[in-house]
């Protein structure tokens, strides 16, 4: 995993970087699974290895796949990164050991949820009652955020196919310009020679 | 099988074999001169991750990890299709030329 991260920063061919970031996400997901966080592992695999690879490739198809090389790597940024990482590692010293039954997370309110959520809320599934009742406002806020994000994406992307929009004409004109100037691909050369 | 006081099961050996082959395919992904080396290496690494998860499930006594392995295999498959489509057409959207070209 560390080797993958190292090569991620060193490689200049952005296509390879995208592929390697997919591999990195898969390793991270496997690590989460070993730590018994299966739901997080699912999310990491689906978002990190699946969707974000495809989105990155979509970005690459619109831009270039070579990175501009900067001569001197900035030293301050490196120091800053190591300091932040050090602070984060220092923060983990305060945490209880992995799987410790006396950790606050197992003692605080979880027991009450397990014992009384059936009579207080109703659903036989404790997770459901925690999400829908004990954390109701939190879930409402999350839903609002997701809804807003979906609406925003639809506003930005969803209309570009509509030819009657004023922007659509500009996009089409640019495509035509590309057609005039773009180099013939290998397939077209083949067609021309045959 | 017991070697030097340690009981070694079939799964241990399989795990080590998978880890070794994973390292080999990662090496190919790092240095691979052409695009296709990298695609193949990443695909193989994904498959090996699926194997690793399954073997870890059996080592841990929880064979239900197989379902998660299945999900990873699906994601790996879709990702590889997207990558190969990108390599061939330089685009992921609708086909630009020809009616059904680039439609997978």
Image: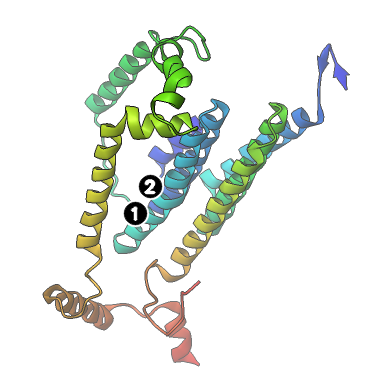
| Outermost residue, bottom side | A194
- Give coordinates of residue A165: x percent, y percent: 14, 76
CA neighbours of label 1 inside 10 A, class few (<14), some (14 to 19), many (20+)? few
Of residue A46 and residue A89, the one placed in the foreground of this image is A46
Residue where numbered disc 2 is placed: A12
B77 horizontally vs A43: left or right: right
Q: Which residue is mark 1?
A: A66
Query: Which residue is painted at 21% across and 55% down in the image?
Result: A152
> Badge 2 sits on which subunit?
A
Residue A107: % across, % down: 44, 10
Q: Name above or below for residue A25 compared with residue A173.
A: above
**Residue A176 position by quadrant:** bottom left
Secondary structure under the numbered disc 2 in the rendered image: loop
* Residue appearing at x 16%, y 80% in the figure: A164
Callout 2 touching callout 1 (CB < 8 Å): yes
Q: Is residue B7 above or below residue B14?
A: above
Please tell me the numbered disc located at residue B41: none
């Amino acid at each position: 995993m560390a080797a993958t991260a190292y090569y991620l920063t060193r490689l200049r061919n952005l296509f390879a970087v995208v592929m390697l970031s997919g591999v990195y996400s898969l390793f991270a997901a496997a690590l989460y699974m070993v730590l018994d966080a299966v739901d997080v592992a699912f999310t990491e695999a689906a978002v990190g290895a699946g969707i974000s690879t495809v989105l990155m490739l979509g970005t690459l198809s619109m831009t270039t796949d070579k990175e501009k090389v900067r001569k001197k790597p900035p030293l301050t940024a490196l120091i800053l990164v190591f300091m932040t990482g050090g602070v984060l590692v220092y923060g983990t010293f305060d945490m209880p050991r992995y799987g410790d039954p006396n950790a606050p997370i197992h003692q605080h309110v979880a027991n009450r949820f397990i014992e009384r959520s059936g009579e207080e809320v109703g659903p036989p599934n404790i997770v459901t009652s925690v999400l829908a009742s004990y954390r109701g406002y939190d879930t409402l806020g999350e839903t609002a955020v997701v809804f807003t994000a979906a609406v925003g994406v639809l506003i930005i992307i969803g209309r570009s196919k509509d030819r009657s929009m004023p922007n659509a004409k500009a996009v089409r004109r640019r495509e035509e310009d590309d057609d005039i100037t773009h180099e013939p691909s290998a397939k077209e050369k083949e067609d021309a020679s045959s | 099988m017991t070697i030097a006081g340690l009981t070694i099961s079939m799964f241990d050996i399989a795990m080590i074999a998978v880890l070794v082959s994973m390292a080999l395919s990662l090496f190919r992904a790092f240095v691979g001169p052409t695009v296709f080396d990298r695609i193949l290496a990443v695909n193989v690494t994904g498959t090996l991750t699926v194997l690793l998860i399954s073997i870890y499930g059996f080592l841990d006594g929880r064979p239900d990890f197989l379902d998660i392995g299945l999900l990873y295999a699906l994601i790996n498959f879709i990702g590889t299709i997207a990558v190969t489509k990108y390599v061939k057409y330089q685009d992921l959207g609708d086909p630009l030329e020809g009616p059904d070209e680039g439609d997978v």
